[in-house]
Amino acid sequence: MKLSPFRLLIYAFSVLCSLVFLYPLLFSFQNSLKDNTEIYSENLFALPAQWLWSNYKRAIVEGHMDWAVLNSFLYAAAGTVLALILGLMASFVLSRIKFKFREAIYLYFITGLMIPVFSLMIPISRLIGTVNGFNNYVVLIVLYAVIELPFTIFLITGFMRGISKEIDESAVIDGCKPGTLLFRILLPLTMPAVSTAGILAFFSIYNDLIWNVLLISDRSLFNISIALMSFVGQYGSVQMGPTFASIMITIIPTIIVYLLFQEKVENGLSAGAVKE
Amino acid sequence: MFGRKVYPTVILFLLPVFLLYTFIFIVPVFQTAYMSFFSWNGIKSVALEFVGLSNYIDMFKKAEFYRSLKNVGVFIVASFVLILPIGFSLALIITSKMKGRRFFKVAYFMPAILPLTSVGLMWQFLLKGDGGLVNKLLEIIGLGMLQQDWLGQPNIAIYVVVAVNAWIYCGLNMIIFASGIVSISEEIYEAASIDGAVGWKNILFITIPLMKETFKIFAVLAVTQSLRVFGQIYVMTGGGPNGATDVPTTMLYNESFKYNNFGMGNSIGTFIIVVGFLATIVLNKLMSSKADH
């Protein structure tokens, strides 16, 4: 194919767009290694005169950003696993067993997709207050899992309904218990839906902001969002280097996860967006 | 299946999920509605005081409330004038046979996966009045007179936030559009090329009409997701300067957790739930009935 001017124009546009999306990130990385004088200097594109890795050290030692990343991973991993287990159990019943009110109960769960959770911040924080659940890993993880339930159930039930029922029948004839049937036989067949739901849940819990703000005040339980906000609140523009470093610390793990599971992440997040 | 043992299985598998979901997700919906008729300052030991409709009356009297609705409107409009055309163009790029399309895909999608808080804070610094990236770039390209504190000007702050929001979510919508583009069969394009259709004509007369369903989904999302915007605003401006960038969700947060006016917070919450519900149902009806004709 030869390069017509038209093609060249499209190519230039594509490259320009990637600059628009990536350059702010590169710029932040570059600044995370500079001191204030250099950040404020006229020379925008200059590499750091001295690579100040100490900015990262300060973000970790003073801002505890390493803990925050760890906490976020913990919340995300545990919350996702719990959401998937609960979601699989419900979906199994809702897709494989016939009983009265089945469709009504399914709709009841799906209704959750239409409710913006932000509108529930008052009653939920009140509820957690009444059980003395502030600053508690387990409470937060259960809350995260339940918030992800409607979508998890929607996705997994939809997928399970497409799996042949004959599998269940032969499994039951072989004396298979429902639990074994679900987790040993059906789960492997449902993996595409499970991984999509799992990725979506993982990302949304990892990135959570509001629930951590409302329910956590103990530093050792901070997730990335609130650790970042409090660290940046302290340093702000007085010390921009450490600020950018702390932002990079929260961004880099997500980039790594994305690059490792590229296709899955793309499909998972876009499936999540079109859930309604 | 499972013969007479159906109900024990149903109860064992469904009941825990059902109870958790009901108590943590559904009961709060009704509590929001119920508590919107009471005044409460957020302190556990202080009793709720029944005030009838006065929270709603106060809410509908507040100029800030209408501004927050207008701001949601700005988000919705921006979805159609910014995210739709850009996202669709990007989708065309990554589904073409162009060299480097895999790199482009990753580059465009990157902002969508990053933590909202990190990205919001990053932009807060890039948009700063003194020494921010945006101002410096303007200086370099000779538009120095446009320099300003982008998030600090009440009359433009919301548009700046909306632009950052587009920067974040174009990539996500690109993937949605791309899956619509990919689902169109190659044969249709081949048939068209026999008839002499090329380039722009293909896009205009084949791709876009055949992607009607995808665009419909996008339209529903543009409205429902705009009602849910929270993190972007909370992180970048907190609703300021002077409430200029408030949306209903941040207003709910500020009224309740900043000013301890939980009654008003709950009436805003109820409003969001009802409008969100209606919007989803009405839009879906509208879209599907059009498909029948």
Image (cartoon, coloured by chain):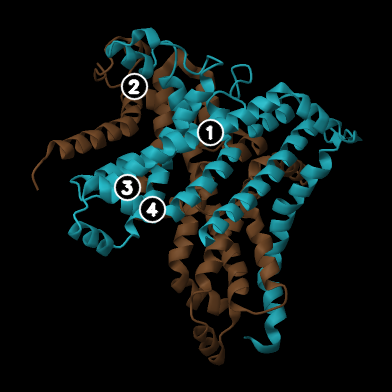
Chain colours: A brown, B cyan
Check disc 3 and report the residue beneath it: B204
- Asked if labels 3 and 1 touch by Cβ distance under 8 angstroms, the answer is no
Determine the secondary structure under disc 2: helix
Question: Distance of mark 2 from mark 4, alpha carbons?
Answer: 46 Å
The residue that appears at 33% across and 41% down in the rendered structure is B89
| Residue A55 showing in the rendered view | yes
In front of the other: label 1 or label 3?
3
Question: Distance of mark 1 from mark 4, alpha carbons?
Answer: 25 Å
Check disc 1 and report the residue beneath it: B75
Which amino acid type is shown beneath numbered disc 2? Answer: Asn
Question: Distance of mark 2 from mark 3, alpha carbons?
Answer: 43 Å
Could you tell which of marks 3 and 4 lies nearer the N-terminus?
Answer: 3
Check disc 2 and report the residue beneath it: A31
Task: State the image quarter where residue B119 is shown.
Answer: top left
Check disc 4 and report the residue beneath it: B209
Label of residue B186 in the image: none
In front of the other: label 1 or label 4?
4
Determine the secondary structure under disc 4: helix
Q: Is residue A241 above or below residue A272?
A: above
The residue that appears at 51% across and 89% down in the rendered structure is A170
Could you tell which of marks 1 and 3 lies nearer the N-terminus?
Answer: 1
Respond whether the residues carrying marks 1 and 2 are from the same subunit.
no
Q: Is residue B247 above or below residue B227?
A: above
Q: At which x and y percent is residue B82?
A: 42, 34
Question: Seen from this angle, which residue lies furthest top?
Answer: B145
Chain letter behind tag 2? A
| Residue A67 showing in the rendered view | no
